[in-house]
Amino acid sequence: MKCVNGIVAGLLLIALTVAGCGHRLPSHGWETLIDGDKGLENFNRIGDANWRAEDGAIVADKGKGGHLVSKKSYKDFELYAEFWAAPNTNSGIFIRASDPNKIGATSAYEVNIYDQRPDPSYGTGAIVNHAVVNPMPKAGGRWNTYVITAKGPEVTVSLNGNVTVFMKDSSFPSGPFTLQFGNVDKGAPGGPIKWRKVQIKEL
């Protein structure tokens, strides 16, 4: 009987470990902003992207472009995001936006998701205009995780557990963060973007 109980306990531990691999487990200090198809109420929308809840995620795939802008402003933080992008998706996470109504790489740090960017040095895994990625990883066609840590002038970006860039820069000390779709009006291909889990912890 002890042997059987040990086997059952072992199988239960394995099952719990596997179940936890795809999602960050809740822990102290983390604020969950998107969880499956819930969370649009935690953001303001700018642009005309057709953000909606669908199939366990927050999705956009039509429009000239747009952002979900966090209602809160953040200075020092760790941001965790699970996303799915097509190979032709142009998206990203903009952090410490200085103007929440006019988001761009000149008014925030843009952590890019753009496998087909003409200049791949600022493609997926890079911080546009600030930190070059080489070689550029690709995120298209699967679920990925971004972990972005910002503390003072230091910003570290990790994609799927691998650090892609680290920089020191004081251009943008604080501000909301945004989740981007598109810029189709600027010639980008405009593939879909899905956000399944977004959590942030202030440091």
Image (spheres, rainbow, N blue to C red):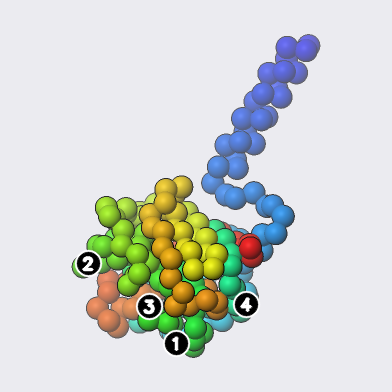
Which residue was labeled with disc 2?
119
Q: CA distance from mark 3 to mark 1?
A: 10 Å
Residue type at the position of mark 1: Lys
Which residue was labeled with disc 4?
72
Which comes sooner in the sequence, label 2 or label 1?
1
Instruction: Give yes or no for contact between labels 3 and 4 (Cβ–Cβ under 8 Å).
Output: no
- The mark lying in front, picked from 3 and 1, is 3
Which residue was labeled with disc 1?
102
Q: Residue 18, how many percent across, how many down?
A: 57, 37
Which comes sooner in the sequence, label 3 or label 4?
4
Q: Can residue 130 be seen at all in this image of the molecule?
A: yes
Q: Can residue 193 be seen at all in this image of the molecule?
A: no
Residue 132 sits above or below residue 137 on the image: below
User: Which residue is located at x 56 percent, y 81 percent?
Assistant: 44
Q: Residue 107, how many percent across, how many down?
A: 42, 82
Which comes sooner in the sequence, label 2 or label 3?
3
Q: Residue 23, how many percent across, how many down?
A: 57, 49
Question: Which quarter of the image is occupied by the C terminus?
Answer: bottom right
Residue type at the position of mark 4: Lys
Judge the density around disc 1: few (<14), some (14-19), many (≥20) Cα neighbours within 10 Å.
Answer: few
Judge the density around disc 2: few (<14), some (14-19), many (≥20) Cα neighbours within 10 Å.
Answer: few
Which comes sooner in the sequence, label 4 or label 2?
4
Image position of 54 (left or right of 190) = right
Residue type at the position of mark 2: Asp
Instruction: Give yes or no for contact between labels 2 and 3 (Cβ–Cβ under 8 Å).
Output: no
Q: CA distance from mark 2 to mark 3?
A: 15 Å
Which residue was labeled with disc 3?
105
User: Which residue is located at x 72 percent, y 55 percent?
Assistant: 28
